[in-house]
Image: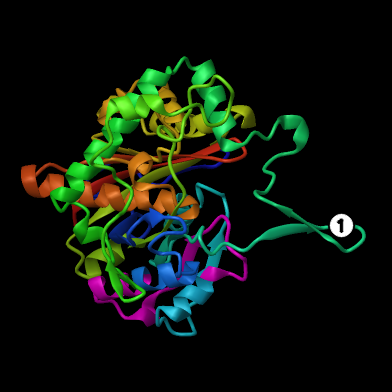
Amino acid sequence: MRGRSLLASVNPSGRGTDESRQPVIIAALRSPICRANGQLKQFRAPDLLAPVLSSLLESTGMDPVEVDDVIIGNAVGGGGNLARYAALQAGLPMTVPGLTVDRQCGSGLDAIALASRLVAAGGDPLYLAGGVESISSAPARAHRNDDGGLDFYARATFVPPEFGDPDMGVAAENVARDFGVTRQRQDEYALRSHRRAVDAAAAGKFSEEIVPLTSNGTLVDTDDGPKPSLRAPLMARFPAAFVRGGTVTAANSCFDADAASAVVITSLKRARSMGAADGLTVLGCDTHGVDPELLGIGAAYAAERLLSSSNLVADEVDLIEFNEAFASQTIACLEHLGVDPARANLEGGALALGHGYGASGAVLVTRLFAQARRKYQETGASALGLAMISIAGGMGTAALLRYSRL
C-alpha cells in the first residue's frame, strides 16, 4: 500500500459512499503559465499564488474563516512555508494555517492528494490545495564548505550517488532508449501538443480557468508558450540537447515556466451543503517509486497500480492529463498503460504550455476540471479523468477523478 490511497469506489455521484468522507474538488483555477524570466518574472511565488487563492474564495462565495488549511506544493522556493505566507497575502484570516509540500515536480498534485486523504479521514474539512513555482525568482542555492565558503549549485541531488542521479534531460534520453521512442515520434508528439494548445487558446478554452495578473502595468491573461508558427522542418533542425547523438532536443522538451494553480476540496456532504453545482470526485491517488535512471517512467507505474486497484483499465478513462516534461517519457508512459498518446492532453500540455515544477501537478487537475465540465455541457456525459506526473528521483504520482453534477 506504499503511497496508495483509494478514497472511494468508482461511482459518478458518490452516493452509496460515506458522503462526509468522500473528497470532492468544487473549484479549480490557475495563473497564466509564462516562460521563466519572462512576463511574470517580477512575481515571487506568493505573488503568483495569492491571487489564485483569493479568486477561488470569490468564485465559491465561501467565508475565508471556514478554510481549515492551505496545502501548497513547491519545489525550488526559498522555504519559510510559503503556503502560510500566500494565505495571509490572499486575505485569509490569521486563524487559517498553511502547509508546504515538496515532492519536486509532483508537489502540486501531491498537495491535492494529501488534502483528499485528510478529507477522507473525516470531519468535513475544507481545504485550498495546489502548487506554485516562480522559477524566475527562485533563490540561489549553495552548500556551506568546511571553511565557511559557499559552493553554489544549480539543482539539488535527489538520490544517493550509488543509485544514479541523472539530469532530467539525460533521464529522458534513457527512457527514449529503453522504451524505443524515436526522435521522429518525439517531434511529432511535441508539435501536436503545440497545435492543440494554440487551437484551444484561440477557442477561448483556457480563459475561464485563468486568473489574470498585472505585470508592470500590463495585463497578463494568456499562456505565452504555444507556438502557432512551429512546423516539422523547424523541429527537425534542433540538435540533441543533453546527450551527444541523442534524440531529446529543446523542441521536444518542455521549457521552465512560472505558474500557480489551486483547488477547493472538501467532503461531498459539505460541498452539497455549500450549494456547489458540480465537482471532481477524487476516487484515488497513488505514488510509486522507480529506478532514478528512468525517472520519467514513474507516472506510468503509479497510474497502473491506481487503475488496477480501481478495477479499471486505461481505455475506460475519458480524459488524461500527463505532465509533458519530455515527449519521450510522455509517449513511454502512455504506451506502457496501453494508451494511444494521441488520446492524452487533448488541449496541449507542458511541451507547449511550460512546466512550472511544483505547480504543474495542480495545473493537470485544473485542466481536467475545465475539460470535464465542458464535456458535460456539450454532451451531458460525466467524464472519468486521470492526472499523471513523473518526478525527479524516480517517482510518479497519479490521481483518478470523476466529474459529476452534485
- Residue beneath disc 1: 145
Query: In x, y percent, where is residue 132?
Result: 46, 60
The residue furthest right is 147
Measuring from the top left, give residue 339's x and y in whole percent. Answer: 32, 24
Q: Residue at x 65, y 50 (%)?
A: 154
Q: Can residue 161 be seen in this view?
A: yes
Say what secondary structure mark 1 lies in. loop
Q: Height in image: 286 above or below 126?
A: above
Residue at point 43%, 61% (across, down): 122
Screen quadrant of the N terminus: top right
In the image, 159 versus 398, the foreground residue is 159
Residue 216 in which image quadrant: bottom left
Image coords of residue 262 (percent x, y): 37, 61
Horizontal and vertical percent position of residue 60: 25, 71
Residue at 54%, 17% in the rendered image: 178
The answer to whether residue 346 of the structure is visible from this angle is no
Quadrant in the picture for residue 143: bottom right
Amino acid carrying mark 1 in the image: Asn
Circle 1 Cα neighbour tier, 10 Å, few/some/many (<14 / 14–19 / ≥20): few
Q: Does the magenta stretch include residue 110?
A: no
Image position of 28 with respect to 175: above or below:
below
Q: Is residue 121 left or right of residue 34?
A: right
Q: Is residue 147 positioned above or below 15 on the image?
A: below
- Left or right: 40, with 339 as reference point: right
Q: Please name the colour scheme applied to the rendered image.
A: rainbow
Which is nearer the eye, 309 or 18?
A: 309
Q: Give the range drawn in magenta.
A: 53-82
Whether the magenta-drawn stretch holds residue 77 is answered as yes
Q: Is residue 73 above or below residue 289?
A: below
Q: Which quarter shows the C terminus?
A: bottom left
